[in-house]
Amino acid sequence: MMSNDKIESASPHVLPSLPYANNALDPVISANTIGFHYGKHHKGYVDNRNKLVAGTEFADLPLEKIITKTAGKADKTAIFNNAAQTWNHTFYWHNHWHETVIDHRRVGTCLLLGLPEPTRGLCQRSAGYVD
């Protein structure tokens, strides 16, 4: 389960904040791509889910509960799809970035789309993401 307070809160659900600036993943993922995918696509799932659950038994449930209670129910497919895609996209954004503290300063590290560690490390160093 994700532990993002905005995700866990009851209805209306809000688009969770990105854990980094729109341009933090350049040049791997451009600010324009993030702006579109996050600001329009991901937001669309959140907005649609809010419309679909308004006035239902799911309206005040946290995201994960909506997913588990609608999974496999044909009459709840639209709710499930929008809730699950909201979770999926939030998970996606949070798996691109990790912050650590080195010498009393925060250092963000792009995780580069789940590449295996040796490859990711080489890519990060060559792209200038790590010291």
Image: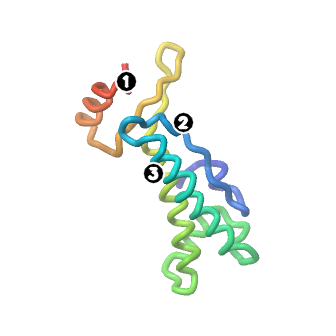
**How far apart are the two marked residues, 3 and 2, measured between alpha carbons?**
15 Å
Identify the mark nearer the N-term, 1 or 3. 3
Is residue 34 shown above or below 11?
A: above
User: Residue at (55%, 69%) from the top-left corner?
Assistant: 82
Quadrant that contains the C terminus? top left
Residue 99 is left or right of residue 119, and the answer is right
Instruction: Give the label, 1 or 2, closer to the camera.
Output: 2
Query: What SS does tag 1 mark?
Result: loop
Q: Nearer the viewer, residue 38 or 91?
A: 38
Residue type, label 1? Val
Dots 1, 2 in contact, CB < 8 A: no
Q: Which numbered circle lies on residue 21? A: 2
Residue 40 is left or right of residue 9, and the answer is left
Identify the mark nearer the N-term, 3 or 2. 2
Residue 114: image x %, image y %?
A: 33, 45
Instruction: Give the label, 3 or 2, closer to the camera.
Output: 2
Q: Which residue is mark 1?
A: 130
User: Residue at (52%, 59%) from the top-left corner?
Assistant: 41
**How far apart are the two marked residues, 1 and 3, measured between alpha carbons?**
21 Å
Q: Which numbered circle lies on residue 92? A: 3
Dots 1, 3 in contact, CB < 8 A: no
Residue type, label 2? Ala
User: Residue at (35%, 45%) from the top-left corner?
Assistant: 113
Query: What SS does tag 2 mark?
Result: loop
Residue 31: image x %, image y %?
A: 48, 41
**How far apart are the two marked residues, 1 and 2, measured between alpha carbons?**
17 Å
Query: What SS does tag 3 mark?
Result: helix
Residue 64 is left or right of residue 55, and the answer is left
Quadrant hosting residue 26? top left
